[in-house]
């Protein structure tokens, strides 16, 4: 009965144009439900399946962290090593440790959120070139004195893994992490193509070269492989070690309120893997649509599995508003998530209101009321424009506040 409820629940999102991907729910080693929805490749008509490999974005970080912990067990690194021990000559390398990189507490700025990233994200890059793009930027704070989510630190960890092990990053993961766990369909190459939904239509997402993600987000995996992975995640990886903006963070994953989460968002894809230790429950949602309701689906599936109330999805209703309103919303806004400051530029484009968060593609804000808008940005985002230049965002289940710092 619960299996049928789970299927109806996810299928409703797919039929509303709010999901395409694969899901899995398990209790311990027993899979309670798994299924694919929508298409992995619209041009070829290939359906999504539980064994379809999707880009998993920042869920990659837990695998990078596991590689560091394995190298620590072999005596090749220590988490309190300064980076300079492994990457001589790196600025601030004597003050920044591997632990700082693993917990986003290094102070190194995130290269993904820099202005102009979306203009270069489709071109291949070497790791050395990627590191050169951020290594000389000033630190945001003294290492260990704060937290700011930074993909840059994880790229450095990929370089540490290669130098300490003598293997390329992808080869190390395959030989020492993926193959030993039977994760045969996981690696740096996936099958599903990434899309963005617009009025129920799937449009190909802009191209992001995987070299731009590297050890911070380049891995591809399946819901079944990630179930194998989650059964063996050590407590040392979960932590938590730091806290910021109400989120407790370990080595690549967050925890709180009886739930351990690893999530990812990248161009064309969003994903989440969540464990509920008290129930021995695991829920995984992988989507090849950037604006999929992945967070809502994960929490709904968990509620069904636990016999708790859940809310079925409904279609959003958009309205027409006077475009003159948009002039009052235009400007540059700043916001924080897990300590990282991001910039959002809101502009009027004729009779449309547009937004661009640095590191993401420019997108339309569609009105649900004169003050409430919907956007396609790494999951589903709803924005409430308030007096005083403040915007309250519900971003894939997380509450974020943006404040205007300049009018346009």
Image (tube, rainbow, N blue to C red):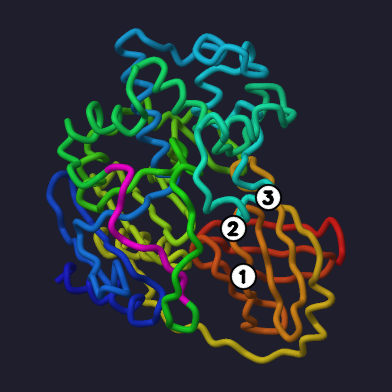
Residue of label 3:
342
Tell me the quadrant of the picture where the C terminus can be found.
bottom right
- SS type, badge 3: strand
The residue under the point 19% across, 49% down is 27
Q: Nearer the viewer, mark 3 or mark 1?
A: 1
Describe residue 91's horizontal placement relative to residue 216 as left or right: right
Residue neighbourhood size for the residue with mark 2, other residues' Cα within 10 Å, grouped as few (<14), some (14–19), many (≥20):
many
Determine the CA span between mark 2 and mark 3.
Answer: 11 Å
| Residue 316: x %, y % from top left | 51, 83
Residue of label 1:
363
Nearest to the observer: residue 278 or residue 124: 124
Tell me if residue 188 is in the magenta stretch: yes
Q: What segment carries the magenta color?
A: 187-197
Describe residue 401's horizontal placement relative to residue 234 as left or right: right
Q: Is residue 352 above or below residue 25?
A: below
- SS type, badge 1: strand
Q: What is the quadrant of residue 372 in the picture?
A: bottom right
């Amino acid at each position: 009965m619960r299996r049928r409820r789970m299927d109806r629940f996810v299928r409703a999102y797919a039929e509303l144009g709010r999901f395409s991907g694969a899901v899995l729910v398990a209790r311990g080693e027993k899979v309670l439900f798994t299924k694919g929805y929508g298409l992995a490749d619209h041009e070829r008509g290939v359906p999504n399946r539980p064994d379809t490999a999707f880009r998993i974005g920042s869920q990659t970080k837990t695998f990078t962290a596991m590689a560091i912990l394995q190298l620590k067990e072999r005596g090749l690194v220590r988490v309190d090593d300064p980076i300079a021990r492994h990457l001589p000559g790196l600025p601030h390398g004597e003050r920044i440790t591997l632990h700082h990189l693993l917990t986003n507490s290094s102070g190194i700025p995130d290269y993904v959120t820099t202005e102009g990233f979306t203009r270069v994200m489709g071109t291949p890059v070497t790791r050395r070139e990627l590191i050169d793009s951020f290594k000389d930027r000033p630190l945001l704070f003294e290492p260990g004195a704060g937290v700011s989510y930074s993909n840059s630190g994880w790229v450095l960890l990929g370089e540490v893994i290669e130098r300490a092990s003598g293997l390329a990053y992808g080869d190390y993961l395959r030989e020492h992490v993926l193959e030993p766990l039977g994760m045969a369909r996981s690696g740096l190459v996936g099958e599903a193509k990434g899309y963005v939904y617009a009025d129920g239509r799937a449009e190909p997402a802009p191209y992001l070269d995987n070299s731009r993600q590297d050890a911070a987000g380049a891995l591809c995996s399946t819901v079944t492989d990630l179930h194998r992975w989650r059964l063996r995640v050590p407590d040392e990886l979960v932590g938590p070690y730091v806290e910021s903006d109400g989120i407790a963070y370990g080595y690549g994953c967050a925890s709180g309120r009886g739930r351990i989460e690893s999530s990812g968002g990248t161009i064309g894809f969003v994903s989440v893997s969540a464990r509920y230790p008290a129930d021995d429950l695991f829920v995984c949602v992988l989507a090849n649509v950037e604006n999929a309701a992945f967070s809502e689906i994960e929490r709904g599936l968990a509620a069904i599995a636990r016999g708790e109330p859940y809310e079925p999805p409904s279609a959003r209703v958009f309205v027409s508003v006077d475009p003159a309103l948009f002039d009052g919303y235009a400007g540059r806004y700043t916001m924080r998530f897990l300590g990282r400051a991001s910039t959002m530029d809101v502009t009027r484009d004729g009779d449309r209101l547009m937004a661009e968060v640095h590191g993401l593609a420019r997108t339309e804000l569609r009105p649900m009321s004169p003050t409430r808008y919907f956007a396609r940005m790494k999951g589903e985002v709803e924005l409430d424009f308030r007096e005083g230049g403040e915007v309250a965002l519900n971003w894939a289940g997380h509450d974020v506040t943006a404040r205007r710092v300049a009018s346009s």
